[in-house]
Amino acid sequence: MAQSPQLYKQLCAISWGKVFSTSPVWRAEKHNTPRHLNEVRQMDIEVAFADQFAVMKYQEEVMKHIIENVIEKCKEEIKLLNLDLKIPKAKYISYDETIELLNKNGVKIKYGEDLEPECEKKLCELFKHSLVFVHSWPTSIKPFYIWPIDKKVSGGFDMLYGGMELSSGGQRVHVPEILIENLKKKSLNPKDFKWYVDAFRFGAPMHAGWSIGLERITMVVCNLDNIREACLFPRDRDRLSP
């Protein structure tokens, strides 16, 4: 049961150039919240010869296209749900700028900490009707496969919209030696990832991508209080049927 197509879509992208997929994924989420499920549908892309900013632009265009189509084709549903939908703008802001902005607006957060729900909500309030791309995160809080721009800053990003994180992505590591170093830093055994590391030993290009939860998009676009309302048969820690 795949938790993510991440490693596999990278191998496809370095061969084919561009990869797009929608797939079910299963997560051993211990969170029992209105925004978490254990089985979700996920949209992924991966693009060769791209960095974090290139794929953020792809995501901006995809999200605008989705919402534009909802506004155009779902007028009755929008009226029924009393939605205030607008084609979003895009705001690009670095992690460092985000930390400074949140502290100035009364949300206490230290450098190196992840964005809690309170932080995500505040950012979306500050940039209403916007896709908020928080980029250039610290390497310490991003996965081993995210490219380190330097020892401190990574090529990773998160996209926030409607009060919460909808997506994460970034430029990937394509150099085997750096990948092995990153695995060790995360207390992972490179031998367990030999097939993955070896795939980059034959001249793999730089590449980047993202994934986004389709139930979360539905939840936010429809202004639902609970992600379970955005799924026909939700699966969580307490529900396996129907």
Image (cartoon, helix red, strand yellow):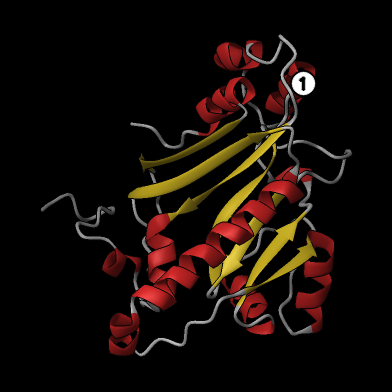
Badge 1 crowding class, 10 Å Cα cut-off, few under 14, some 14 to 19, many 20 or more, is: some
Query: Is residue 168 found left or right of 23 in the rendered image?
Result: right
Question: Is residue 157 visible in the rendered structure shown here?
Answer: yes
Query: Is residue 41 found left or right of 16 in the rendered image?
Result: left
In percent of the image, x 36 and y 49: which residue is there?
41
Which x, y percent locates residue 136? Answer: 79, 52
Please give the count of numbered marks on the rendered protein: 1
Query: Is residue 216 found left or right of 61 in the rendered image?
Result: left
Vertical placement of 151 versus 53: above or below?
Answer: above
In percent of the image, x 78 and y 60: which residue is there?
95
- What is the residue that sits farthest to the front in this orientation? 72
Q: Check disc 1 and report its element: helix, strand or loop.
A: loop
- What is the residue that sits farthest to the left in this orientation? 242
* Residue 127, picture quadrant: bottom right
Front-most of 222 and 72? Answer: 72
In percent of the image, x 74 and y 24: which residue is there?
205
Quarter of the image containing the N terminus?
A: top left
In percent of the image, x 21 and y 60: which residue is there?
232
Residue named by callout 1: 175
Q: Amino acid at mark 1?
A: Val
Vertical placement of 173 versus 116: above or below?
Answer: above
Query: Is residue 22 found left or right of 141 in the rendered image?
Result: left
Front-most of 33 and 78? Answer: 78
- What is the residue that sits farthest to the right in this orientation? 150
* Residue 178, picture quadrant: top right
Which x, y percent locates residue 139? Answer: 77, 43
Which x, y percent locates residue 18? Answer: 59, 33
Which x, y percent locates residue 68? Answer: 49, 72
Front-most of 9 and 134? Answer: 9
Vertical placement of 12 versus 168: above or below?
Answer: above
